[in-house]
Amino acid sequence: MNFYELLIPQLLAGAVIIVIALRAVHQSRLESEAHEQRIAKKHVVHEQYAAQVQEALAHPELPASTFITEWARLPVLRVTLDLADPNALADVGRMAQDAGPLITGLSDYEVKIGGRGLTFTEMKVAPGQVILTLTPKNAAGATERVARVADALNATFGAITPIHEPALNLGSLPGDVAGARAAALAA
């Protein structure tokens, strides 16, 4: 065995170490850039909020909520589940448990389109119906997202034209529910 044949494994090992080090440096740069973007985005939001507070202070005769958008009430998603028996009154506890997969699916879809999910905030029971109220966790852009979630539910479980989204998984309806429809409402 000559000297060069002994050197080949060491050169290959060195090349592998260099590749791993370069990959680590690249990953670190990507993470640093992402962190800087998050900080810049937060800075912009804080500047907007400070400008809104200054505007509210400049007009003390008006309620501050007219200037500060974070104080605006969130839109809600009102989901109406139509029971198979139009005269039946649903058991609230069982229906809340049975509607879990649907609520989870709607919340997951809201996250997929840029939100932080939906919170189950209210349930009402009427003869033949159960009405669920879901509130978005993220106020920024909530009106558009809630409308998209309502459209997706109506397209999936209702009789309207389907939306152009790839294979939505919005969960499933409880067994004694014949249909569902949703509407985005201002709270």
Image: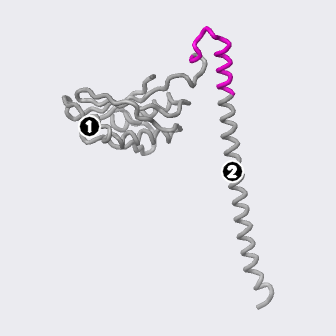
**Where is residue 12 shown, x and y percent of the image?**
72, 75
Q: Nearer the viewer, residue 17 or 162?
A: 17
**Where is residue 186 shown, x and y percent of the image?**
45, 22
User: Quadrant of residue 154 in the image?
Assistant: top left
> Please, which colouring scheme is shown?
one colour
Q: Which residues are magenta?
A: 47-65
Amino acid type, residue under disc 2 in the picture: Leu
Left or right: residue 63 versus residue 178 is right
Residue annotated with mark 1: 177
Amino acid type, residue under disc 1 in the picture: Val
Confirm whether residue 107 shows in the render: yes
**Where is residue 187 shown, x and y percent of the image?**
45, 22
- The circle on residue 30 is 2
Q: Main secondary structure of the magenta part?
A: helix
- Residue 51: within the magenta? yes
Left or right: residue 88 versus residue 137 is left
